[in-house]
């Protein structure tokens, strides 16, 4: 069976050790986490985790079942129809062509977000596949640093 990319959302208690339990579940079974983001849900004592992983159908089913069994878990959603975004920040030397970089960023829902005397920082926020293309495209401008946020997703 072919490995497929899956995005899984998990609503968990916002308490110490929850992240360790979830990552331990993956590590203990030899599953890899490609991307993991966690943020508190406003006005609750819960957090929303978005996990991107790869596996065949059986592996994904096993991951979802194990996440349901985890004590601080309230809800597990394997996304089928979703809105998915990822952000990337890129630091460039001040000599890089600002107008070219800005135009590229704007094509990926971004722009220039900070500038100093020695560098400037650009941002893009789009679907993960498009962020991959953006990261490839900016290499020609010799970025000093690239930092990706990880995926956030919401069911339609």
Image (cartoon, rainbow, N blue to C red):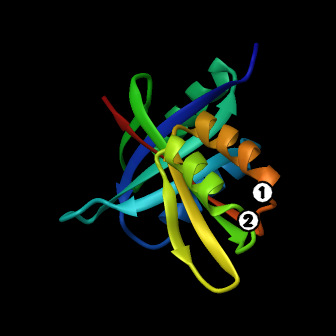
Question: In this picture, is 46 found above or below 121?
Answer: above
Residue 86 appears in view: no
Distance from label 1 to label 2 (Cα)?
A: 6 Å
Pointer 2 residue: 96
* Quarter in which the N terminus is drawn: top right
Residue 103 appears in view: yes
Q: Residue at x 63, y 62 (%)?
A: 98
Residue 38, position as x, y percentages in the image:
46, 59
* Quarter in which the C terminus is drawn: top left
In the figure, is residue 3 to the left or right of 131?
right
Q: SS at mark 2?
A: loop
Q: Residues within 10 Å of mark 2 (few under 14, many from 20)?
A: some
Q: Which residue is drawn at 38% across and 55% down?
A: 12
Outermost residue, bottom direction?
A: 117
In the figure, is residue 105 to the left or right of 49?
right
Question: In this picture, is 13 found above or below 155?
Answer: below
Q: SS at mark 1?
A: helix
Pointer 1 residue: 141
Q: How crowded is mark 1: few (under 14 residues within 10 Å), some or many (20 or more)?
A: some
Question: In this picture, is 82 found above or below 58?
Answer: below
Residue 123, position as x, y percentages in the image:
54, 59
Q: Which residue is drawn at 61% across and 43% down?
A: 131
The quadrant where residue 57 appears: top right
Pick whichever, 113 or 97, lies toward us.
Answer: 97
Q: Residue 24 carries which label?
A: none
Pick whichever, 4 or 91, lies toward us.
Answer: 91
Question: In this picture, is 151 found above or below 82?
Answer: below
Residue 71, position as x, y percentages in the image:
42, 53
Outermost residue, top direction?
A: 1
Q: Residue at x 28, y 59 (%)?
A: 41
The mark nearer the N terminus, 1 or 2, is 2
Does the residue at mark 1 contact the one at mark 2 (Cβ under 8 Å)?
yes
């Amino acid at each position: 069976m072919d490995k497929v990319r899956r995005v899984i959302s998990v609503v968990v208690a916002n308490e110490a050790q929850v992240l360790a339990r979830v990552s331990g579940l993956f590590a203990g079974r030899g599953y890899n986490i490609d991307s993991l983001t966690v943020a508190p849900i406003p006005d609750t004592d819960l957090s929303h985790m978005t996990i991107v992983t790869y596996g065949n159908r059986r592996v994904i089913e096993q991951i979802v079942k194990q996440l349901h069994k985890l004590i601080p878990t309230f809800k597990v959603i394997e996304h089928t129809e979703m809105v998915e975004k990822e952000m990337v920040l890129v630091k460039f030397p001040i000599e890089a062509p600002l107008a070219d970089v800005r135009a590229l960023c704007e094509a990926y829902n971004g722009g220039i977000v900070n500038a100093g005397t020695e560098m400037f920082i650009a941002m893009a926020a789009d679907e993960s596949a498009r962020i991959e293309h953006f990261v490839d495209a900016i290499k020609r401008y010799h970025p000093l640093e690239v930092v990706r946020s990880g995926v956030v997703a919401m069911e339609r």
